[in-house]
Image (tube, rainbow, N blue to C red):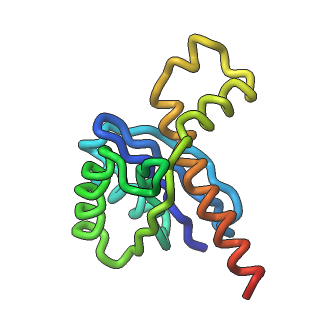
């Protein structure tokens, strides 16, 4: 079965998460420097079959793209160029960093370890992907 890859793209670091083969659960897998994300994805796709990318898209509270959207737009162009056959879905990423930080607190992660921003990035990617998976499941039940 194919997996779905969730991506929390940032100027410096990019968090990556993947779904289980059934597309029910999202799991954070890593954080990579943003300059190497395409190479990382190429290697990942050689090992696993990927059906879709779900990319967090930064929005303001008034539903307009935030300043960070221009960097994500550039990344989206790279995805389309290097992976033209894999569809890309954008998912609202508002508040995912705060949710990731709270998840770390709730999970008992120690204060010093919570300072590791790479952990926040990969958990944010998992939250973005899980949001997509949950929405897809709801749409599927309605049909």
Instruction: Count how many numbered circles sit on residues in the image.
Output: 0
Residue 81 lies, in percent from the top left, at: 22, 69
Q: Is residue 32 above or below residue 81?
A: above
- The residue positioned 57% from the left and 17% from the top of the image is 113
Classify residue 20 as left or right of residue 33: right
Residue 16 lies, in percent from the top left, at: 47, 47
Residue sticking out furthest to the top: 112
Q: Nearer the viewer, residue 74 or 44?
A: 74
Q: Nearer the viewer, residue 61 or 114?
A: 61
Residue 32 lies, in percent from the top left, at: 37, 39
Q: Is residue 112 above or below residue 4?
A: above
> Where does the N terminus fall, quadrant-wise?
bottom right
> Where does the C terminus fall, quadrant-wise?
bottom right
- The residue positioned 75% from the left and 28% from the top of the image is 106
- The residue positioned 69% from the left and 57% from the top of the image is 25
Classify residue 70 as left or right of residue 62: left
Classify residue 80 as left or right of residue 16: left
- The residue positioned 53% from the left and 36% from the top of the image is 97
Residue 67 lies, in percent from the top left, at: 30, 45
Residue sticking out furthest to the front: 62
Classify residue 64 as left or right of residue 28: left
Q: Nearer the viewer, residue 94 or 111?
A: 94
């Amino acid at each position: 079965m194919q997996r779905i890859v969730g991506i929390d793209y940032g100027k410096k670091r990019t968090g990556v998460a993947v779904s289980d083969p059934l597309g029910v659960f999202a799991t954070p897998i890593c954080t990579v420097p943003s300059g190497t994300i395409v190479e990382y994805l190429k290697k990942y796709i050689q090992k696993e079959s990927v059906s879709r990318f779900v990319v967090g898209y930064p929005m303001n509270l008034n539903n307009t793209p935030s300043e960070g959207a221009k960097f994500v737009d550039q990344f989206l162009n790279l995805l389309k160029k290097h992976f033209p056959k894999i569809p890309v879905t954008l998912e609202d990423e508002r508040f995912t960093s705060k949710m990731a930080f709270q998840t770390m607190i709730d999970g008992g992660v120690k204060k010093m370890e919570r300072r590791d921003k790479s952990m926040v990035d990969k958990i944010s990617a998992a939250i973005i992907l899980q949001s997509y998976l949950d929405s897809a499941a709801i749409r599927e039940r309605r049909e």
